[in-house]
Amino acid sequence: MRTKLIATAVAGTALAASVATGVGLSGANAGTGTQAAQATTTSCKRTVDPMRVVSLNVKSNPKMSAAKVRADVDKAAKLGADVIMWQEIQPDYYKNIVRAENSTGGNGQWKHYQTGYAIPISIRVGGDSPWVVRDTGVKKMHSGMATVSPHRYVTWVKAYNKQSRQTTIFMNTHMVSGAWNGRYNKADEWRKKMWNIHFAKQSELIKDFSNRGYTVVYGGDFNRQEMAKFTARDSRITLHGIDKIGVVRTANDRIEKVTVRKTVGGFNSDHDAKRVSVRVSGCAAS
């Protein structure tokens, strides 16, 4: 969480209302916490969070063999990230491979969250990782359609940085395919409508977290090349493709430097991995 430079204390309630329909470790109020209100701040001691993130769609349509899935998951886990956002982790043998992944080179261990969904998030903890997971949740964006698309969700993890004393929301998703690929697809209008609903709901969820003072780092497969920003403070880190990673800054955040921005190929999947490392600064929590 980033301390806000504001004139009066503000007790936030928007997040609790938005996340009440989600599933989190803390139940309906998963997005709330002891930092619900911010006191008057007159100075800012800046601290920096290095965000090292990978996003990978592990192709499941058509399904790959367990050996190919395991090879892709192992490769992604060794790319030097602290956070991995996965897509298309289904059926169950895909999920079990992610759950068993622990390739950190002996430096800490991977913890995997929301593995019951096709879009889990893995966080490296221990070793030299600064992250401690405080909460996690999921929110449904829209229902699916038989033979067209499954239900679509957003998953998120709230992680505290022991070094900077800041808290960040890492958010993962996979939007409906075929809406914006320039071809007519089955249920084409439905796809476009659902994509727009998903975007609008995710935007509101991000705004709720942001208004509470949390930096949001999002990633996933958005199935659209050119996409609007979620908010005015959305900094898109990846530059090309339907797989994206971005940072939605709080009012007091700064993007200090993007040190890594890579597309990594060589996977069995029909997607490359996106890998970024970005330094985000904010005011230290009091």
Image (spheres, rainbow, N blue to C red):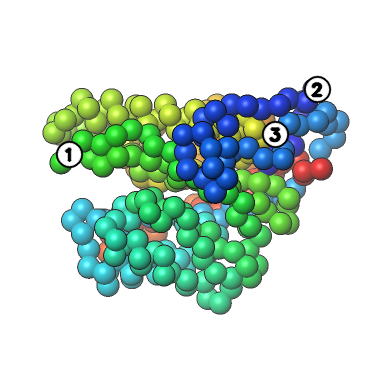
Relative side of 92 to 54, left or right: left
What residue is shown at x 43% (from left), y 29% (from top)? 201
Q: CA distance from mark 1 to mark 2?
A: 51 Å
Relative side of 190 to 213, left or right: left
Q: Position of residue 81 (x, y in %)?
A: 52, 61
Would residue 239 be visible to someone looking at this image?
no
What residue is shown at x 29% (from left), y 34% (from top)? 143
Image mark for residue 7: 2
Graded by Cα atoms within 10 Å as few (under 14), some (14 to 19) or many (20 or more), the crowding at tag 3 reads: some
- Residue position for label 3: 36
Whichever of labels 3 and 2 marks the residue nearer the N terminus, that label is 2
Graded by Cα atoms within 10 Å as few (under 14), some (14 to 19) or many (20 or more), the crowding at tag 1 reads: few
Q: Secondary structure at mark 3?
A: loop
What residue is shown at x 38% (from left), y 34% (from top)? 141
Q: Secondary structure at mark 2?
A: loop
Residue type (three-letter) at the residue carrying disc 3: Ala
Residue type (three-letter) at the residue carrying disc 2: Ala
Q: Is residue 272 above or below residue 33?
A: below
